């Protein structure tokens, strides 16, 4: 394919850090500003198909980074979740790997920091037990050792028995209360659904003298 001549160069109206190059065959390609300033193009210059392809590849990397930064602008993400979201946006594996590594190097992605914030927010706001928490964090595919460490850490801060007691208080259950078998089963099923182990539930029942 013959070289193409540049007939117009302009800055993108939507993205100020992108330069739009218009060629003599009316085709268009875009260049990240930081790439453009290192190898400035001028109207009248000719570009090869190989050069256009190279600029396109660099633009795709820029777009992947921009997408990742927008996602991080809403909340923290795990490495696994970021990979999945970028794949959903049709970036290829090379673009995803490059973007992920760049974010890790800048500490914008950090599974340990993400996991610690994640488990704390879930337990503090939803008052869930260890089983439910493990199920929620599982979707982020953190290392098993890290997951176990984070769960242990968060329940050292938020005692499961205290969480169970907060649920009982919210349900207006008082200590030394006579509860019929049906209501007690309903309460137990609720606490199990919230992710607490039976041992912890039983201990609270005993401490509260729920008969």
Image (cartoon, grey):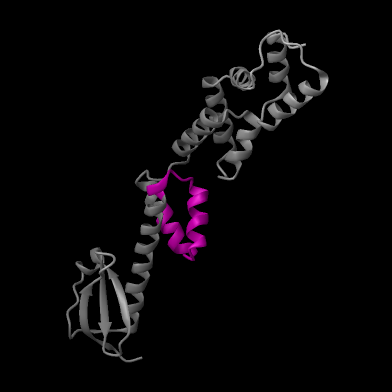
Relative horizontal placement of residue 31, taking residue 206 as reference (left or right): left
Does residue 163 lie above or below 69 as drawn?
Answer: above
Q: How many marks?
A: 0
Does residue 170 lie above or below 101 as drawn?
Answer: above
Percent x, y for residue 129?
Answer: 63, 28
The residue nearer to you, when weighing 54 against 18, is 18
**Residue 16 picture quarter:** bottom left
**Residue 203 picture quarter:** top right
The residue nearer to you, when weighing 69 against 3, is 69
Residue at the image position 66 percent from the left and 16 percent from the top: 173
Is residue 167 highlighted in magenta?
Answer: no
Q: Which residues are magenta?
A: 72-100
Is residue 94 highlighted in magenta?
Answer: yes
Percent x, y for residue 161?
Answer: 62, 18
**Residue 132 picture quarter:** top right
Percent x, y for residue 4?
Answer: 28, 88
Residue at the image position 26 percent from the left and 75 percent from the top: 20
Name the quarter where the C terminus is drawn.
Answer: top right
């Amino acid at each position: 394919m013959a070289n193409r001549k540049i007939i117009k160069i302009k800055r993108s109206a939507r993205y100020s850090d992108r330069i739009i190059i218009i060629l003599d065959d009316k085709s268009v390609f875009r260049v990240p500003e930081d790439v453009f300033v290192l190898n400035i193009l001028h109207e009248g210059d000719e570009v090869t198909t190989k050069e256009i392809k190279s600029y396109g590849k660099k633009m795709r990397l820029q777009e992947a980074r921009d997408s990742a930064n927008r996602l991080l602008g809403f909340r923290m993400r795990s490495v696994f979740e970021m990979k999945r979201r970028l794949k959903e946006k049709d970036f290829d594996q090379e673009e995803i790997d490059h973007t992920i590594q760049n974010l890790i190097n800048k500490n914008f992605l950090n599974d340990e920091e993400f996991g610690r914030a994640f488990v704390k927010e879930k337990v503090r706001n939803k008052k869930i037990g260890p089983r439910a928490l493990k199920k929620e964090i599982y979707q982020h595919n953190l290392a098993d050792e890290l997951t176990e460490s984070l769960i242990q850490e968060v329940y050292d801060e938020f005692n499961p028995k205290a969480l169970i007691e907060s649920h009982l208080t919210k349900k207006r259950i008082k200590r030394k209360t006579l509860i019929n078998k049906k209501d007690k089963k309903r309460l137990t099923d609720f606490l199990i659904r919230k992710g607490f182990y039976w041992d912890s539930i039983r201990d609270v029942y005993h401490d509260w003298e729920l008969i």
